[in-house]
Image: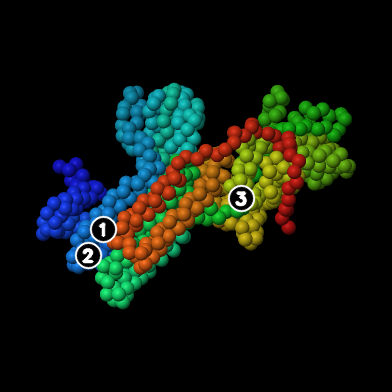
Amino acid sequence: MNALRTRLQGSWTIPIISGPAILASLILDRLVGASVGGDALMIAAAVVAGAPVVVKAYHAATAKVIGIDLLVAVAAVGAILVGNYWEAAAVTFLFAVGHALESATLSRTRSALAELVAVAPEVAVVIRGGRQVEVPAADVATGETVLVKNGSKVPVDGLVAGGTGALDEASITGESIPVEKVEGDEVFAGTISTGGFLQVEATGVGADTTLARIIHRVEEAQDAKARTQAFMDRFSAWYTPAIIVLAVVIGVATQDFVLALTLLVIGCPGALVISIPVSIVAGIGRGAKDGILIKGGEFLETSARVDAVAVDKTGTLTEGRPRLTDVVTLDPGTTRDDVLLLAARAEAGSEHPLARPILAAAVEAGMAVHGLPEDTEPIAGKGIVATIDGHRVGVGNVALARMEGVVDTAAATRTVSELAEAGRTPMVVTRDGQAVGVVAVADRIRHDAPEMIRRLHEAGIEKVVMMTGDVEQVARAVALEVGVDEVRAGLLPEDKLEAVADLQRQGRTVAMVGDGVNDAPALATADIGVAMGAAGTGVAIETADIALMKDDLLKLPEAVSLARRTVNNMRQNVVVALVTVATLLAGVLFGGVTMAVGMLVHEISVLVVIANAMRLLRPRREPGARPPAATLIGATGTREVRVVTPG
């Protein structure tokens, strides 16, 4: 019974009933000529197809909304009153067919959301009381061990506690190549095991999973209106009453009631109303499939206008994992191992990020770095001073060396300058007021950073600016490697905010890419804030204007390209809608377009607009091969780059 009720309430029910009635009326008229039976069938068809329209128009009118349904209802009722039964039946039948087709095709533009919901897991296999128990996925408790077998969906967010396997993470990151998982790796609900066996400790269940956040985000984004859409809504609110007034004026002036009713029908702004939201739904859906979450229509439009991209250096353009690259001796009586061991023992008591690569290199070289210095004193902006076996050891810049009493800093300064020019971060090592050597560390440039910059330029971005707290020489070396247009070096977090504001004062629309922690002020100031690798970071998914689920730099130009294609698609749809209405209006006033033909063309224009938007759903592969492996800063690079420092 429920199935039958559902079918009767389907969008195709009305055309299926009214269509044969119209056909039977036409056949009857052909066989016996004009007859009461033929007219009755035609009126019945108009009533079946028109009644829902009249009801909707009534409800809209009581809510003080004058919409398309009112135009069609007035036209159909008027046609019946003047005896044009065929026009009334044809208009309402075509309107119903158009709505059924519109409903069917529109649902495809939301296919991304439907696919996300479809991958949501329903059951989970957990270990309870030493036995495997199948339970609803929402009933898994945080901390429980979940088993993921070959071919099954991961039911929760969690960490791999045992076993190995491969997971298809396309539903989260858009990347279809399975990712190998081992103990300690993060896994996400909705991903699918393509091999192996995993024991997962649940950390997120039900609504607290990355997949649930993505679905929620896409739902909100697809319903959020773009600025242009809000304008079109206001335009339609005035346009529809204006069409009614125009029809009345034309009807009174010409005394042609049918002409006035025809104007009501062909003036329907259906394609215009749907032209923008259908593109936004399709564009945001395409992004979600590719691991690009866009906050809504307004942010989509702003992203399409972006002409400057600001990127943080550490962790975005570089791997954010510096390593020791150079050890230089300045004292003939001191070996490289002596310099490294001295620096490592001094840094053993430091929390500075550059201490880790020095300690790691010493341990890797087999040196015994045990215990902590007797005393450790960080010197803000200069380095660190420690007491080791009664000796005072300093590790830092040349200013620290001078502070430690080094009189002749010429050799240290020359070495530091040479290493900095090569993109390294050098530190002078002193012992009891004597410079004994220089150690240097460097980060590795991410393998896809240069390709990202190239594709951003191809996508129409005029300026890519790198922002960093590093010194000018190091920043310049990175810039030469990756191909950015401008460098802002020596910046504090508040300086990055000012740098973004400066680009905006130049008239640019700025997108800022950062880690969301020390870049938070700059991200908030930028027109578009972009979070990288947002999978597993609930705050980033909820707050970033654009959240790139995978830590893949090439997703950034892909997002810019998608935004521009979507906005172009919106403009094409608006043009189609306006040209259709203008052509039909001219046809009615000067060329004799009938009510039925007008409705047919009107519905075709609606379908054309939807079909055009559906082109956005097609996957688009960026041209070019994958970039080579990561390179050390300073390995290549010959072009010039503009460097700006604060102050």
Q: Amino acid at mark 1?
A: Val
Residue at image position (34%, 57%) is 602
Query: CA–CA distance between discs 2 and 1?
Result: 10 Å
Say which of marks 3 and 2 sits in front: 2
Label 1, residues with CA under 10 Å away: few <14, some 14-19, many ≥20: many
Residue pointed to by mark 2: 79
Q: Please report contact status of discs 2 and 1: CB closer than 8 Å, yes or no.
A: yes
Q: Which quadrant, please, contains the N terminus?
A: top left
Element at label 1: helix
* Residue 500 position in % (x across, y down): 62, 56
Location of residue 646 (image quadrant): bottom right
Residue at image position (64%, 32%) is 628
Location of residue 127 (image quadrant): top left
| 240 to the left or right of 341 | left
Examine the rendered structure and indicate whether residue 193 appears above or below residue 443.
Answer: above
> Of callouts 1 and 3, which one flags the residue occurring earlier in the amino acid sequence?
1
* Residue 633 position in % (x across, y down): 71, 37
Query: CA–CA distance between discs 3 and 2?
Result: 55 Å
Element at label 3: loop
